[in-house]
Amino acid sequence: MKTVFLICSGLGKVQRGYESFTQECFDALQKEPSLEVMLFKGGGISQDKEFTLSNIHRGSWLADKLSQILKKDPYFIEQFTFFLSLIPYIYQKHPDVIFFSDFNLGTMLWLLRRITGLSYKLLFSNGAPNGPPFTRMDYVQHLTPTHYQMALDAGESVDRHFHVPYGIKMSDRLEMISQKQRTDLCHTLGLPCDRPILLSVAAINKTHKRMDYLIREVAQIPEPRPFLLLLGHQNDESIEIVNMGNQLLGKENFRVKTVALKEISNYYQVANIFILASLSEGLPRVLLEAMSYGLPCLAHDYAIARYVLREQGYFANFEMSGTLTTLLHKLIAGNNESHQIQRHHSIYERFSWDKLLPSYVEMIQRCITVSSDLHRNVQ
C-alpha cells in the first residue's frame, strides 16, 4: 500500500476553494484500498488519519508582526511554520506522494528533498492557476483543458501533466426543498423569504472577486431589489465592501457572512440566483457547488466559465457597467425552475467524486510508478 499526504495549511481556519477541495479529496480517496491517505491541516481537530499541525495562522497578530519584521507575507509565514511541523511526519511516515495546492509549500518541500535526499514525489494541484515552467514539482494537476494545453504548448512534458478537474461532493439526484421548507429555512437563517435572494460565495474583496462591482450592479436594479448575500472569507478589504453594500443597497437588502463549510448548503438551498463577478479563475468550485443545487449561475464570459457552465450558464462582459444588471433583469423576470435538474445533471456527470475518483487514483498511481529518469529531471 502506497502512502499519500494531502496537505493544506488553511484547512480548518479559512473558507476557500483550496480548503474545501483538499477535505473532499481526502474523504473521497479513503474509498481506495490501494492507497493510505493522510490529511494534514492547519486547524480543527485531529482524528483518524487527519492531523492538525501547529502553525502561525495568517490572520493572527503574530503573523502580522513577523510579516513586518521579516518582510514576508503573513500567508508565507503560515505556510513556513506549517511546513516545519510537517517535517517529522515525513520522516516517520515516508510518503510516496505529497499532494498540495499551495505553491510556496511545494517549493519548501522541493528544497527539503534536495537537501535530504528523501524520495517523495510532489503532485501540485494548480488551482490558482500558475503558469509554466513548473520546475519545482514533479507532476501538475490542471483543472481545465485550457491550462493543461498552455503547459504543453510551453514545452512541458506530457508525462508530468494531467487534466483532472476538481471533484465535488454531491448526490446523484437533485435534492429539492418545498416552498414551506425554504420559508422556514430563510427564517432560521435570518433571510427574507418574500423576494429573490442573490448569492455570491467568494473572498470578500474587490481586487479579485470584485464584490464592489457586484454591489454597484445590484444597486442599479429598481426597488424593491433582490436581497444580496455575500458569503466568504473576510480580510482588510472586506470593511470597504460591507460599507459600500450598506450605503448603496441598505442593511435590509444586503448581508456579508463567513460560514463553516458544513453550513453553506443551507444558503445554496434558499438562494434563487448565483453570481461570480471575478474576471478569471482556475476552476471556480463555487460554480460547481451552485450548479449542483440547480441554481442559475451568472459569470463573466470567458473560457473557464463556459467550460464549467456550458449551455446552462448565463454570461456577460462583467468588465462593463450595466451588463450584469441587464442579465439579472432578464433572469429575475423569467422562470428557470425547469432547468434545475439539467444543471445538476451537467455537473454530476463531469465533476462529481462518483465520476472522478478513478481519475484521481490513476493520476496518483502514475506519479508513483513513473520512471526514475523523469523524477531526476526536477531534482
Image (tube, rainbow, N blue to C red):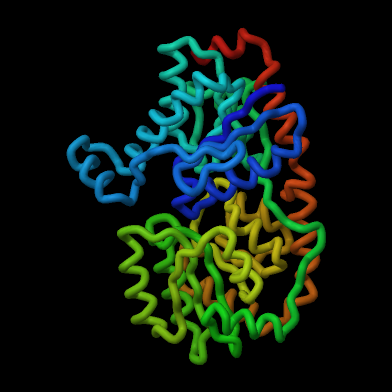
Query: Percent from the top left, x then y, of residue 371?
Result: 67, 11
64 sits to left or right of 325: left
Count of number-bearing discs: 0
| On screen, residue 360 above or below 369 | below
Q: Nearer the viewer, residue 138 or 38?
A: 38
Q: Nearer the viewer, residue 219 or 321?
A: 219
| On screen, residue 187 above or below 14 | below
| On screen, residue 30 above or below 58 | above
Is residue 125 in view from this perspective?
no
Query: Percent from the top left, x then y, of residue 82?
Result: 40, 35
Identify the residue shown where x is 42% and y is 19%: 112
Q: Nearer the viewer, residue 73 or 59?
A: 59
Identify the residue shown where x is 74% and y is 50%: 352
Identify the residue shown where x is 55% and y is 31%: 124
Indicate the quadrant where residue 123 lies.
top right
Q: Quadrant of the N terminus?
A: top right
Query: Percent from the top left, x then y, of residue 346?
Result: 77, 57
163 sits to left or right of 116: right
| On screen, residue 151 above or below 118 | below
Query: Percent from the top left, x then y, of residue 146?
Result: 62, 40
Is residue 122 in view from this perspective?
yes
Identify the residue shown where x is 32% and y is 67%: 239
Indicate the quadrant where residue 36 lies.
top right
Farthest residue, direction front: 47
